[in-house]
Amino acid sequence: MSPHLRALATVPVAVSALFAASLALAPAAAAEPNPPNCEKEYFCMYAGEGQSGQLLLKTKDNWTGNVPARSVFNNGIPYPEADHVQLTWTYNGGTYEECLHYNPGPDPYPYKLSFAEGVAVTKVVWRGEC
């Protein structure tokens, strides 16, 4: 192989190495501080928007019920097949679902939500990736 072709053959390897190094140096998303009374490993629901007001539910397990909530927060930790939450709620006669990543959640998956008045959370199911 000529010296010119040998030099060109090493370019992709060098570019790949630089890309891998830049990923290793990229800062990880910083976790938001725990909301009130919601330690790591828990999913929590609150009476007020933005994780404020009375803590209505705090669970490490799947849950089914009917709780009027204004906000929720997935403070789970990385755990294979059980660190995200499939959340179900009702509002004005409709049923809705959203997968919540654990804190901090990468876009487009949130780890917290605030709701309009009239929302009732009906199900929390721990699951794998969204």
Image (cartoon, rainbow, N blue to C red):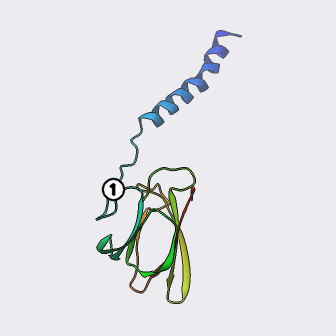
Rendered residue at 54%/77% (across/down): 96
Pick whichever, 104 or 25, lies toward us: 104
Q: Is residue 83 left or right of residue 31?
A: right
Q: Residue furthest bottom?
A: 93
Kindly indicate the quadrant of the structure image that contains residue 4: top right
> Where is residue 109 drawn, in percent x and y?
49, 61
- Mark 1 crowd level (few <14, some 14–19, many ≥20, 10 Å Cα): few
Rendered residue at 40%/44% (across/down): 28
> Where is residue 56 drawn, in percent x and y?
36, 75
- Quadrant assignment for the C terminus: bottom right
Rendered residue at 47%/30% (across/down): 21
Rendered residue at 37%/55% (across/down): 40
Pick whichever, 16 or 39, lies toward us: 39
The amino acid sitting under disc 1 is: Glu
Q: In this figure, what is the number of numbered marks?
A: 1
Can residue 74 be seen by looking at this rendering?
no
Residue matched to label 1: 32
- Quadrant assignment for the N terminus: top right
Figure check: 103 above or below 123: above
> Where is residue 41 drawn, in percent x and y?
42, 56
Figure check: 23 above or below 89: above
Figure check: 27 above or below 93: above
Can residue 81 be seen by looking at this rendering?
yes
Mark 1 lies on a secondary structure that is loop
Kindly indicate the quadrant of the structure image that contains residue 44: bottom left
